[in-house]
Every structure is written in C-alpha cells, then in structure tokens.
Amino acid sequence: MLDLTLLPAYLAAVGIITVAPGPDAAYIVAVALERGPRAGLASAAGMALGMVVHVTAAALGLAVLLRSAPAVLLLVELAGGLYLGWLAVTTIRSARNTTVKAPETPPERQVLRRAALTNLLNPKTVLFFAAFLPRFTTPERGHLWLQLLILGLIFLMMGLVWDSMIGLCAGRLGQGLAQGRRTAAVVNLVAGVAFVALAAFLLTDALRTAMVP
C-alpha cells in the first residue's frame, strides 16, 4: 500500500499540476467554446479515458520503457502535432461555413474519441508518469505496480473533476457568445487558432528534440 506520509505532498503536487494551463485544458476550452457544455464534459471524459491508458502503462512499467526510447516518443509527438493540425483545419473550415448555416454538432462519442486520442498523443503525459509517480512509491510498502496504479487513479480523478469544471464554464461562455452566426464563426475561429497553437507547440518541440544530437 501507499506510504500515507507522502500522500499530502503528492496531492499538493497533483493539484498544482492539474490547475496549471496545458495542452489538455486548452483543447477542452477550444471544444467547449465551439460546441457547448456537453461537448466540454465529453472532452473531459475523453481525457480521462486517455489517462486510463497512461495509468495502466505506468503501472505495468511501460512509461519508464518509453522514456528510454526517445525515437518512439518523437513519433508520438509528431503524430500528436499533425492530428491537432488536422483538427485546426476542420474547425476553421467550420467557422467559414457558419456564416452560411449553423454547423452540425458532432455526437458526443466523436468528441470523446478525439479528446482521448489527443491525450494519448501527448508524450509529455508519458514522461510525467515515468518521472513523477515513482517518486511517491516505497518498495518496502509492497507491490510497486499497485502503488503506481493507486497514485495514477488519484491523478486521473482530480484531473477529471478539474477538466469537467473547465468544460462546463467554457461551454456556457461559448453558448452565451454564439447567439448570432457571425459571433459563432468567431468562436469557431478562436477554437481553430487554439488548435493551431497546440499543433505548433508539439511539432516545434518534436523538431527541437530531433535536432539534439
């Protein structure tokens, strides 16, 4: 089991990391602004599904393995940047079409799937789990995989609560703004620009990593 003396420090660290702005939060805000609170909640749930994979990988030791394989992480980062770039193009096209007719809102299942894929293609999450979680484990307290699993689930639940709050607030704000077609187009354009920024961040970081000998 966990060393309970380390739990307060872990909760404080996770709280700080959770509320700090990052790619996942920016993605949720962009989707919620464009499509409303339900899409924001679906995006938060999708991020949590992606985190389930990361938590499982950390518990099985795969995160540490990937940390030692920079080429694999580079490919994941490139894939994530290209995927977000594709989302940016489709969102900006939607903004252009909004002036003619209201865009069709995709089903929550599609929003959920896109959010999960965005989280899975974020190599920073893999590195975080590989470097951060083991610091709060104690081999003398029992199975390390079980300790990592519990720590990961705590991180997942705190992240889900925060992401859901972000999705709801941003979604309601987007609904308030998108009363007219022109305003809706602006909201979609802002979401598209956010995706462009996220894609540029991942691709630039991947190219910088590739250039390091």
Image (spheres, grey):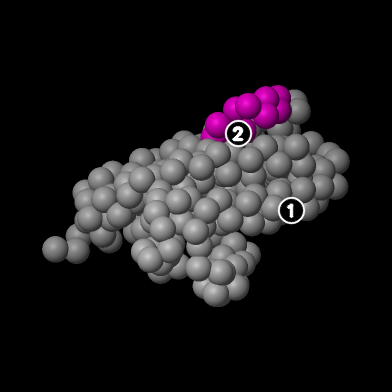
Residue 165 is labelled as: 1
Please give the name of the residue rendered at 56% of the width and 56% of the height, measured from the top-left corner: 155
How crowded is the residue under tag 2: few (<14 C-alpha within 10 Å), some, or many (20+)? many
Q: Is residue 55 magenta?
A: no
Q: Nearer the viewer, residue 80 or 151?
A: 151
How many numbered discs?
2
- Residue 132 vs residue 125, the one in the foreground: 132
| Gap between marks 1 and 2 measured at Cα | 16 Å
* Position of residue 211 measured from the top left corner of the image (x, y, whole percent): 20, 60
Q: Which numbered dot is residue 112?
A: 2
Residue 61 lies, in percent from the top left, at 33, 49
Query: What residue occupies the far left of the structure in this picture?
Result: 213
Q: Give the image location of residue 139, x and y in percent.
A: 36, 64
Report the amino acid beneath label 1: Met
Check the image and report above or below for 70 versus 9. Answer: above
- Which of pointers 1 and 2 lies earlier in the amino acid sequence? 2
Is residue 96 positioned above or below 154 on the image?
above
Q: Residues within 10 Å of mark 1 (few under 14, many from 20)?
A: some
The magenta segment is 104-115
Q: Secondary structure at mark 2?
A: helix
| Residue type at the position of mark 2 | Leu
Is residue 48 or residue 56 the one in the foreground?
Answer: 56
User: Where's the C terminus, which quadrant?
Assistant: bottom left
| Residue 78 visible, this angle | no
Question: Percent x, y for residue 188?
Answer: 67, 42
Left or right side of 201 for 32: right
Q: Residue at 45% of width from left, 51% of height from top?
A: 146
Residue at the (32%, 47%) spot, across then down: 62
